[in-house]
Image: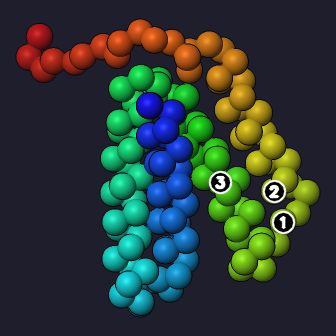
């Protein structure tokens, strides 16, 4: 279920970023409100995914896939340019995410440590 939460976090993050673009600097009310709602949902689902996925892996996947999806949406719907350097950079991010997953730490079933203050 934690991977489903991470996927939802990515989708809401992408929706939040699109709302950010559509808000035109917070000058449009509905996209501005949606931006906040989508980011709250995204961070909530990301937090739930962290119960089972290491923070470094979850954050790398969340941000890496978000960058890739937003870049494609920007190209397809907002006529944003993609050049060779952008493609190489995105491929390096994807390679980093894959390598993190291959390290085995992403699939660990170990329960996260609990931190208590005042020890």
Label 1: how many residues lie within 10 Å, few (<14), some (14-19) or many (20+)?
A: few
Which one is earlier in the sequence, the residue at label 2 or at label 3? 3
Closer to the chain start, of discs 3 and 1, is: 3
- C-alpha distance separating marks 2 and 3: 11 Å
Question: Which residue sits furthest right?
Answer: 84
Q: Which residue is mark 2?
A: 86
Label 3 Cα neighbours within 10 Å, binned few <14 / some 14-19 / many ≥20: some
Task: Say left or right for 28 vs 103.
Answer: left
Is label 1 in a helix, a strand or a loop? loop
Determine whether 18 is above or below 96 in the image.
Answer: below
User: Can you give x and y, in whole percent of width and height, for residue 73 in the image?
Assistant: 70, 68
Q: Which mark is residue 82?
A: 1
Observer-nearest residue: 94 or 83?
94
The quadrant holding residue 46 is top left
Residue 62: image location, x then y, percent: 55, 43
* Residue visible at 72% across and 77% down in the picture: 77
Residue 71 x %, y %: 71, 62
The circle on residue 67 is 3
């Amino acid at each position: 279920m934690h991977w489903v939460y991470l996927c939802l976090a990515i989708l809401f993050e992408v929706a939040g970023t699109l709302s950010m673009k559509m808000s035109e600097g917070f000058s449009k009310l509905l996209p501005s409100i949606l931006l906040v709602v989508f980011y709250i949902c995204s961070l909530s689902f990301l937090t739930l995914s962290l119960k089972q996925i290491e923070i470094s892996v979850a954050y790398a996947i969340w941000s890496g896939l978000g960058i890739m999806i937003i870049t494609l949406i920007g190209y397809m719907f907002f006529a944003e340019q993609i050049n060779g350097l952008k493609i190489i950079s995105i491929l390096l991010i994807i390679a980093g995410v894959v390598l993190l997953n291959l390290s085995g730490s992403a699939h660990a079933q170990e329960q996260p440590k609990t931190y208590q203050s005042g020890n």
